Amino acid sequence: MSDLETSLRAYARFVESQHTAVSVESIIGDPPPGRRRPPWPTRDRQPRRRALLIGSILGLGVLLGATLAVVDHHDSGVSVKTVPSTIPVGPSTTAVAPTTTPAASSTTIQSLDTFAPAAQGPVTPRVLFTHRAPSGNTVTARAGTVTLPCTWSPLVTDARCGTPGHQYATGPGVEFDYVISGQRHRSLVLDDDPRAVPGPGPTGMAALFASPDPTYPDRTTQDLVILRVGAQVALVRLTTTGPAGAAPDQMTPVDGWVSFPVRSNDNVSDPQAFDTTGRPLGSALPYPCC
Amino acid sequence: MGDAGHDDEAVESFRSFVAATQRRLWLPLCMEVGAELADDAVAQSMAYAWQNWARIRAMANPEGYLYRAAQRYARRARPHRVVALPRLDPSHEPEIEPGLIDALAALSPHQRVAVFVIDGCGWTLAEAAALLDVSVSTVRNHRARGMARLRELLEVDIDV
């Protein structure tokens, strides 16, 4: 046997040791509703697809109305905690992008909501906000009963996290659907997750961190900073510094949530919190923290 | 449409099928899409198999069918096809050529799978062809080209 074949066999033994056995009981038991049908097209899905198509056409008006309602909701969320323009800008002089949802993001919301009609779950996720970073990366948060691959994992690269199409967690929570450099990921924070409770510090922020697979060819990952903030926080700023320079980003909390999409090879500052008067509350947490 | 109701015999036959099949599906899939996604794809295909067990168990090549199903699932889940092969600390496995994993990653998916299951896992050409649902000669060609490319990448001149 050649060295190459010996090496291949040794590697195969290692790979085999990585295999995680499928639990038959979880399959023959009562799989979650979302797993009853395969994600790939099969003949028996054709009638369902036709029904969905007809339903989509009939529901177009409803979706348009819902989209307008979403925008209205977002606008109201911003206005509740209005931040005066006198808040000092961060270390960079680069213009800060507006945190309100631009028209293009509204389209994204409408498109994504098409996949979550009311009939599929007891509580249809409602869009909390769409945030577009200066880099063009976006994150859309939805609250409700959501089904996603897994909950967020602080500083743990879990390949299943955020991989579209998986259904490992279902429950009330907030889904973060984010697009970084054209790649879409999703992460979920369940309502009953004790880590998503703002701490007692002056800024009252809990920092969560989603880092989904994969690692891209340039050895970067695409991460999402998720902050759960207390009522005293009116604005959160975070600056990422990459090859193109510093890019300050900021966001007004919506229902206590703030999130920033970032690329892992960018330097990320500690998130800084401000109150409604523009007074810095500081960054009471090490970033990322758990 | 899923099959409604399963008797004990169906449950037992499905258990046996999963026990005998899941690793055989997972290994080539791992080389094609990465370990984590292979886990998910195999789980999904097995769930689908159970829902359609009466039909699938009657197939001539249920393994091949489910392998294609898992492939399609994986491609839909990660269409950009960035494959992260399982990596290890070379110091723990001195038998493994340090550049092997990168060299494997440089092969085409078909070549990588053929080389891995035949030369790594010791499958026969017929076994690999049956699972991949291609002809034996196709697998033979993929394997030959893959091994040639591996030798080139690893600068292995003599293979005795």
Image (spheres, coloured by chain):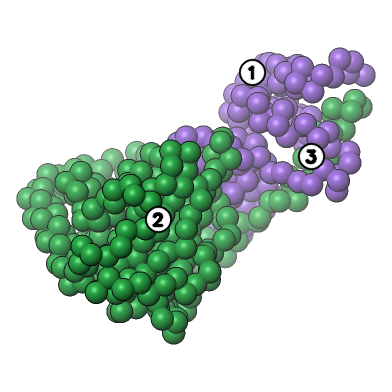
Chain colours: A green, B purple
* Of residues A232 and A222, the one drawn nearer to the viewer in this rendering: A232
Mark 2: give few (<14), some (14-19) or many (20+) Cα within 10 Å.
few
Could you tell me how far apart the alpha carbons at marks 2 and 3 are, in whole angstroms? 49 Å
Q: Position of residue A228 (x, y in %)?
A: 38, 71
Can you tell which quarter of the image residue B133 is in? top right
**Front of the two marks 2 and 3:** 2
Q: Is residue A44 visible?
A: no
Mark 3: give few (<14), some (14-19) or many (20+) Cα within 10 Å.
many
Above/below status of A21 relative to B21? below
Q: Earlier in the sequence, mark 2 or mark 3?
A: 3
Q: Which residue is mark 2?
A: A91
Q: Mark 2 vs mark 3: tell me if same chain.
A: yes
Could you tell me how far apart the alpha carbons at marks 3 and 1 are, in whole angstroms? 24 Å
Residue type, mark 3 in image: Tyr
Task: Name the residue rendered at 33%, 47% in the picture.
Answer: A94
The chain under label 1 reads B
The chain under label 3 reads A
**Front of the two marks 2 and 1:** 2
Residue with the most extreme bottom position:
A200
Above/below status of A218 relative to A128? above
Can you tell which quarter of the image residue B57 is in? top right
Residue type, mark 2 in image: Pro
Residue type, mark 1 in image: Thr
Q: Which residue is mark 1?
A: B138
Q: Which residue is mark 3?
A: A11
Task: Name the residue rendered at 61%, 24% in the picture.
Answer: B108
Q: Secondary structure at mark 3?
A: helix
Q: Position of residue A128 (x, y in %)?
A: 25, 63
The chain under label 2 reads A
Task: Name the residue rendered at 21%, 56% in the picture.
Answer: A100
Q: Which quarter shows the N terminus of chain A?
A: top right
Can you tell which quarter of the image residue A2 is in? top right
